[in-house]
Image: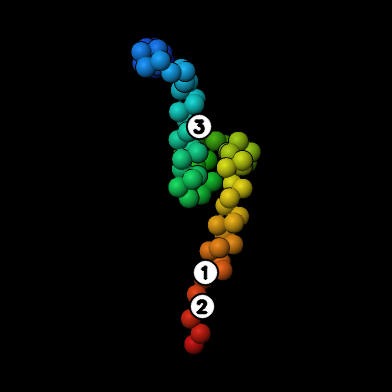
């Protein structure tokens, strides 16, 4: 697979990526799609969820604002 990536990257004239870069992009996409860090951690095979969180915590700054907006938009049905 590495040889194929090298060949295609060279042919396309772009910087070569590593298989690990694909893994990182996959995890980042799942987080951006809103999947829980626990599910992402399990998918990556990390023994501890902290490993995943420490690696991908930088992707969460905008999540706090989305959380606040979600709570503010929550409609409570008074009965």
The tag earlier along the polypeptide, 3 or 1, is 3
Residue position marked by numbered label 1 in the rendering? 73
For the residues labelled 3 and 2, say whether their Cβ atoms are less than 8 Å apart. no
Q: Is residue 78 visible?
A: yes
Number of marks in the rendered image: 3
Q: Position of residue 60 (x, y in %)?
A: 59, 46
Q: Secondary structure at mark 2?
A: loop
For the residues labelled 1 and 2, say whether their Cβ atoms are less than 8 Å apart. no
Q: Secondary structure at mark 3?
A: helix
Q: CA distance from mark 1 to mark 2?
A: 9 Å
Q: Residue furthest bottom?
A: 79
Instruction: Find residue 22 and report its image quarter.
Output: top left
Rendered residue at 46%/43% (across/down):
30
Q: Residue furthest front?
A: 13
Q: Position of residue 45 (x, y in %)?
A: 50, 35
Name the disc covering residue 24, or none.
3
Packing grade of label 3 (10 A; few <14, some 14-19, many >=20) is some
Q: Secondary structure at mark 1?
A: loop
Q: CA distance from mark 3 to mark 2?
A: 39 Å
Packing grade of label 2 (10 A; few <14, some 14-19, many >=20) is few
Q: Quick one: 63 or 55, which is closer to the camera? A: 63
For the residues labelled 3 and 1, say whether their Cβ atoms are less than 8 Å apart. no
Rendered residue at 61%/42% (across/down):
57
Residue position marked by numbered label 2 in the rendering? 76
Q: Is residue 48 visible?
A: no
Q: CA distance from mark 3 to mark 1?
A: 32 Å
Considering only vertical position in the picture, is 4 above or below 28?
above
Rendered residue at 45%/47% (across/down):
33
């Amino acid at each position: 697979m590495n040889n194929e990536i090298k060949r295609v990257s060279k042919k396309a004239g772009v910087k070569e990526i590593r298989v690990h870069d694909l893994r990182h992009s996959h995890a980042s996409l799942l987080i951006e799609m809103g999947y829980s860090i626990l599910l992402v951690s399990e998918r990556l095979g990390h023994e501890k969820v902290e490993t995943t969180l420490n690696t991908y915590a930088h992707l969460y700054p905008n999540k706090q604002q989305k959380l606040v907006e979600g709570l503010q938009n929550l409609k409570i049905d008074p009965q």
